[in-house]
Structure formats: C-alpha cells, structure tokens
Amino acid sequence: MATRPSDTDGMTEPCRECERETLHRVQVELRTESSKPENAEYSREPYRVSTCFECGTTSAQRMNDA
C-alpha cells in the first residue's frame, strides 16, 4: 500500500499537468550547462526542481533567472 506524503514532506503549489494546487517535492540541484568537459566545473548553476506527488511531473527553473 502506497503512503501519501505529509505536508512536511513538500510544498503546495500549482501543477500545470494536474491543473490545480498539489503537494510537490522541491529541491535545489547544481546542473552543468557546458557540454565541454574542460569547462564543466565552471558552468554549474543552481536549479529549483519541483516534482508533483500526484502526477510525477517535474519542472526545473534556473535560480539565476528567477
């Protein structure tokens, strides 16, 4: 039996796929933007990654563009 996450496990925010407010897991990830291996360590940027607990849809936004 699957368990539903509690409110302390995430944030309530709009989901484009569900078209309503749902609980999301929100985290910050460092993502490499350069495709060149020699520049990879200098091209990491923080991204806000949000995953809907209802439908599993994930969205990411570059934090420096927020």
Image (cartoon, rainbow, N blue to C red):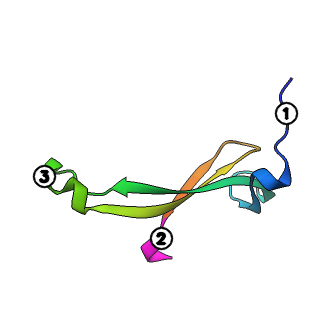
Spot occupied by residue 8 in the image (x, y as percentages of width and height): 81, 55
Residue behind mark 1: 3
Alpha carbon of mark 1 to alpha carbon of mark 2: how far?
Answer: 31 Å
Residue pictured at 85% horizontal, 33% vertical: 3
Sequence order check: which comes first, mark 1 or mark 2? 1
The type of residue carrying mark 2 is Met
Using the numbered discs, state the Cα–Cα distance from disc 2 to disc 3 in whole angstroms: 24 Å
Crowding around mark 2 (Cα neighbors within 10 Å: few <14, some 14 to 19, many 20+) is few
Q: What is the x, y in percent for residue 44?
A: 32, 60
Q: Are marks 1 and 2 in contact (CB under 8 Å)?
A: no
Q: Position of residue 30 (x, y in %)?
A: 41, 56
Instruction: Count every numbered label the image shows and give the total.
Output: 3
Q: CA distance from mark 1 to mark 3?
A: 44 Å
Q: Residue at x 13, y 52 (%)?
A: 38
N-terminal of the pair, mark 2 or mark 3, is 3
Q: Which quadrant holds the N terminus?
A: top right
- In the picture, measured across the screen, residue 55 lies left or right of residue 39, that is right
Q: Residue 58 — which label? A: none
Q: Which residues are magenta?
A: 62-66
Residue where numbered disc 2 is placed = 63
Q: Amino acid at mark 3?
A: Glu
Q: Is residue 63 magenta?
A: yes
**As drawn, is 4 to the left or to the right of 16?**
right
Amino acid of disc 1: Thr
